[in-house]
Image (cartoon, helix red, strand yellow):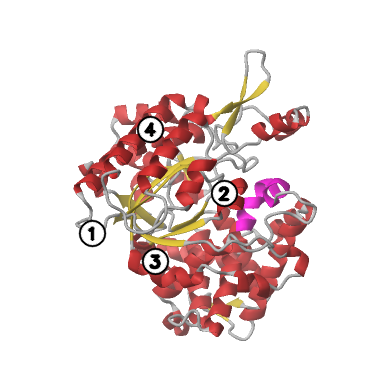
Amino acid sequence: MAAVRSLSSRLSRFALFECTTDLSHLSTHEHAALKHLVKAGTYLDQLYMRQAWSGNEALRTKLHAEGNQELCTLFEMYKGPWAREDDNVPFIEGVPERPEGGNFYPQDMKKSEFEAWVDTLSETEADQAKSYYTVVQKNAENEFESVPYSEAYADLLKPAAQCLREAAQELQHVQVKGEGVHIHQFLSSRADAFESNDYLPSELNWLRLGKGNKLEVTVGPYEQYTDALFTLKSAFEFYIHVRDDHSSGLLEKFSDLQYVEDALPIPEKYRNKDLVAAPIVVVNQLFAAGDVAVPMTAAYNLPNDERAIKKGGSKLVLIKNVQEGKFDKVLTPIASQVLAKDQLVHLTKDAFTTHVLLHEVCHSNGPHHTLDGHTVRSKLQEYHSALEEAKADIAALFAADLMVDRGTIDNVSQKEFWVTFLASAFRSIRFGIQEAHGLGQAIQLNYLVEKGGFACDGETKLYRVDFEKIREAVSDLTRDILILQGDGDKQAVDAFVKKYGVLHQDTKDALQRIDHAGIPVDIRPIYPLQTTA
């Protein structure tokens, strides 16, 4: 069915959403900086296209030359010729299957070949081969070699760096109150990183950006989802946000999750002994480029580089205007199709946005290294992303329950969290279970149904929360996922994913009702800033 969707029907699955906010408080220098930043984004957008697939840049040029507006819009929306929410089916004839390793490795390379090559390297060379910031290519002798991003993408990173420096020059003239790194310092150091391939100093600058900065910019190689082969290589992404200081202040009380870590239902040996409280920044999005294909990101917790996390912790960015767009245009109509009518009263925007916030914070909770000292990522490989997303989801629901009891959260009830979470599961699963968030949600839904926390009525086919059983079911799933991560037993994780990471008939029926109702899968952005820059 996915392959025969028309172009217009694909576009209609994503409701248009204007990403903007009040900019009247910005100075002339900040407005000027925004123009340079948008220009940098155009380079990084092309860079990500190259990272995703070797044929992307040529195909992009061809499509725009041919002038089919719907096809061009879809290609830019998905950052390539594959519809992610339709199990990566191609919507353009003649393209191959989406490459599992993106364009980070030789296209014909097998996993076993890479692993055998790494085994022959020195420790330093092996670290480079597995680095977040190198591509693996074949040299003139047809042998594998690691090439730093600064060399592989020099034609795009050098002009992008120049744009960041021009933005920094404008922002030098802006007075910033309070302590912390000035945004012009971060942009300058990030530009240097593009050319040196040393991202740690600028990563620490980003983590230490002062609250007095009106702009919040995230730019660099971050997420590893494009590398589904090993989840090693980082893709470039770029966000321009304006800070919402009032909302940031309200939510800072959630940043310390040490008491949640202490309450996790796991043996002591699995607890995170190095938990660092994540600062929280609430923003409104103005522009995004690079690894930002639909579905739109509503929050993120960065960096992913363990070296940077160890030195500087992480930072949570909650994108307020995108969150509100998703709830209004997608989640509310989905709930009307899947939830028992008497439980719809418990669906709330505050429950949705607060859970997304806690999801990002809870990425910090639990084991990041296995009991035998390896990173969880290196042991679980292709399963890592889906299990990590499921961990953050269910640990956030566990944390929400604790916080309501404790009084830290006083505007959302447990019932609202549980019911809103149930409806949101179908929103994520619609993106396909080949995608980390969708697979993670399918695992959770099936597990919680098996434990009786969620149930589907045999006659109405509508889902409801069993308020007597859900708390224990959430605790059990939190425990099981954290222990799987801490053990790093890939065989056990494989069995777990194969058991729960499937779509049962009740779920398929619910997804079909949602589709037949014409409910958008997600929102797609319009950036007024891009047209004025």
Q: Is residue 302 magenta?
A: no
Measured from the top left, where is residue 496 in percent x and y? 72, 59
Mark 4 vs mark 3, CA separation in Å: 30 Å
Q: Is residue 245 left or right of residue 439?
A: left
Mark 3 vs mark 2, CA separation in Å: 22 Å
Can residue 423 be seen at all in this image of the molecule?
no
Classed neighbour count for the residue bearing mark 4: other residues with Cα under 10 Å, few (<14), some (14–19), many (≥20): many
Q: Main secondary structure of the magenta part?
A: helix
**Marks 1 and 3 close (CB-CB < 8 Å):** no
Where is residue 226, by image quadrant?
top right
Amino acid type at mark 1 = Asp
Which residue is painted at 36% across and 50% down in the image? 9
Q: Is residue 444 left or right of residue 180?
A: right
Q: Earlier in the sequence, mark 1 or mark 4?
A: 1
User: Front-most of 362 and 195?
Assistant: 195
Mark 1 vs mark 3, CA separation in Å: 17 Å
Classed neighbour count for the residue bearing mark 1: other residues with Cα under 10 Å, few (<14), some (14–19), many (≥20): few
Mark 1 vs mark 4, CA separation in Å: 27 Å
Mark 4 vs mark 2, CA separation in Å: 22 Å
- Residue hosting label 4: 160
Task: Indicate which label's residue lies in the foreground, 3 or 2.
Answer: 3
- Residue hosting label 1: 22
Residue 304's disc is: 2
Amino acid type at mark 2 = Asn
Amino acid type at mark 4 = Ala
Which residue is painted at 66% across and 46% down in the image? 382
